[in-house]
Image: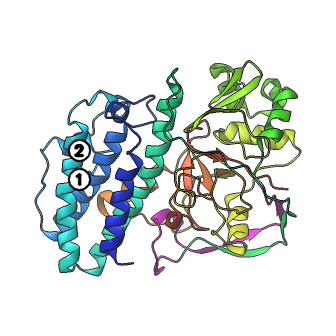
């Protein structure tokens, strides 16, 4: 697929994801970690205008203050509007933001049609992968907003397919040296935090072929998992008590047991489906309760390289319209899998030059690595080397766990 066609496809997908939403939905910010849908649409456009336009000799097409209000965290670009207050931006309106997208798209598409240098195509490609990240955030942020609404509005009415995967033996690997990451001169796309490729010794290990299920999580809860201090890391125990955490996010007590708020309405937790929306602290405590552990990110990558099939994975474009977890048997998709690894640079890591160097490197502190992609991740955005990262208490993403031994 040409860069031009890919540009059109990804930009159109962002707008498609907003189709079930009202204009009012797109302004809501339900917590500081989330951003309004409208802001995602504008920020991903700002990225192209800010980083690509100057390289192809184009002047900005937006008002000067857009540079500030839609800047996420790039200190090298200039000041940013407070992340926690993005929901107060009633202007520009949704239609103005869509008009902004149209103007920038016309400029980028014209440049791609006329032809640009390979290094600029790579910059456009970075912008497209950045937009795919925000497509996932758009979904998880609006899910949080809708699920916090006592009216429990539905994003999209869809039938709930049942999980029907037969159990498989765990993945087993002998100890040895393994290549981790990608070479700096890798021919395909990757983010800078996936490089450079290096050799890592990985002891013998076993990794479950399935994600932990709702039934297993309910057993953990019934056994008092959230009230046993010996299962929890110190920070995790403090977090549980400070926030009165007793179940995964979006689980609530109903008349006949737990109910789960989803993008498709309120349902009972399907026992064989993977549990999602759990923090690293919860995942770690569950693993300890089960007599297992979380894998390292290196173990996960070794297993993913040996099982690279993505055709079965539940990803954003694999089950159009359906956005609730199900087990597929793939190591990819459904839920981002917490690992025990801290988010740190690989040996001899070098960030991108200039302001783009802020994309990943400056977040390598107090965060944990997640692997595998989720049901809200576009298919071409997952690979064995992709490193996602969040603080250990975060759980509004589709986060899951796979046990190791």
Q: Which residue appears at 63% of the width and 21% of the height?
A: 243
In the rendered structure, the answer to whether residue 65 lies left or right of residue 90 reads left
Residue 58 sits in quarter: bottom left
Dot 2: element = helix
Q: Is residue 85 above or below residue 204?
A: above
Give the residue number, with chain letter if any, for mark 2: 97
- Packing grade of label 2 (10 A; few <14, some 14-19, many >=20) is many
Q: Which residue appears at 45% of the width and 54% of the height?
A: 133
Q: Nearer the viewer, residue 281 or 177?
A: 281
Instruction: Give the extent of the magenta segment.
Output: 183-210
Q: Position of residue 173 (x, y in %)?
A: 83, 70
Q: Nearer the viewer, residue 318 or 398?
A: 318
User: Quick one: quadrant of the N terminus?
Assistant: bottom left
Q: Which residue appears at 64% of the width and 53% of the height?
A: 334
Q: Main secondary structure of the magenta part?
A: loop
Q: Which residue appears at 49% of the width and 31% of the height?
A: 146
User: Quick one: quadrant of the C terminus?
Assistant: bottom right
């Amino acid at each position: 697929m040409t860069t031009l066609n890919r540009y059109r496809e990804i930009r159109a997908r962002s707008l498609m994801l907003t189709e079930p939403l009202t204009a009012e939905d797109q302004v809501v910010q339900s917590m500081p970690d989330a951003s309004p849908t409208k802001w995602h649409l504008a920020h991903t456009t700002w990225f192209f205008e800010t980083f690509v336009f100057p390289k192809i000799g184009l002047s900005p097409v937006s008002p000067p203050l857009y540079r500030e209000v839609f800047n996420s965290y790039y200190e090298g670009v200039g000041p940013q509007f407070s992340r926690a207050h993005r929901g107060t931006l009633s202007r520009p309106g949704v239609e103005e933001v869509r008009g902004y997208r149209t103007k920038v798209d016309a400029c980028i598409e014209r440049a791609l049609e006329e032809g640009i240098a390979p290094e600029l195509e790579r910059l456009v490609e970075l912008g497209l992968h950045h937009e795919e990240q925000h497509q996932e955030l758009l979904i998880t942020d609006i899910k949080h907003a809708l699920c916090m609404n006592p009216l429990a509005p539905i994003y999209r009415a869809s039938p709930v397919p049942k999980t029907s995967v037969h159990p498989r033996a765990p993945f087993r690997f002998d100890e040895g040296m393994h290549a981790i990451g990608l070479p700096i001169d890798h021919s395909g796309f990757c983010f800078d935090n996936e490089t450079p490729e290096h050799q890592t010794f990985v002891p013998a290990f076993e990794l479950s072929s399935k994600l932990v299920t709702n039934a297993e999580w309910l057993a953990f809860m019934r056994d008092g998992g959230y009230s046993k201090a010996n299962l929890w890391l110190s920070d995790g125990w403090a977090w549980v008590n400070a926030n009165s955490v007793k179940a995964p996010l979006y689980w609530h007590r109903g008349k006949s047991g737990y109910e789960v708020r989803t993008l498709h309405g309120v349902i009972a937790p399907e026992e064989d489906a993977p549990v999602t929306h759990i923090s690293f602290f919860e995942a770690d405590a569950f693993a300890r309760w089960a007599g297992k552990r979380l894998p390292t990110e290196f173990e996960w990558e070794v297993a993913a390289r040996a099982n690279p099939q993505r055709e079965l994975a539940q990803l954003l474009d694999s089950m159009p319209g359906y956005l609730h977890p199900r087990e597929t048997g793939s190591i990819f998709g459904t839920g981002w899998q917490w690992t025990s690894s801290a988010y740190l640079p690989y040996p001899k890591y070098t960030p991108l030059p200039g302001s783009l160097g802020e994309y990943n490197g400056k977040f390598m502190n107090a965060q944990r690595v997640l692997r595998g992609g989720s049901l809200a991740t576009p298919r071409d955005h997952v690979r064995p080397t992709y490193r996602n990262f969040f603080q250990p208490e975060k759980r509004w993403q589709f986060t899951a766990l796979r046990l190791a031994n």
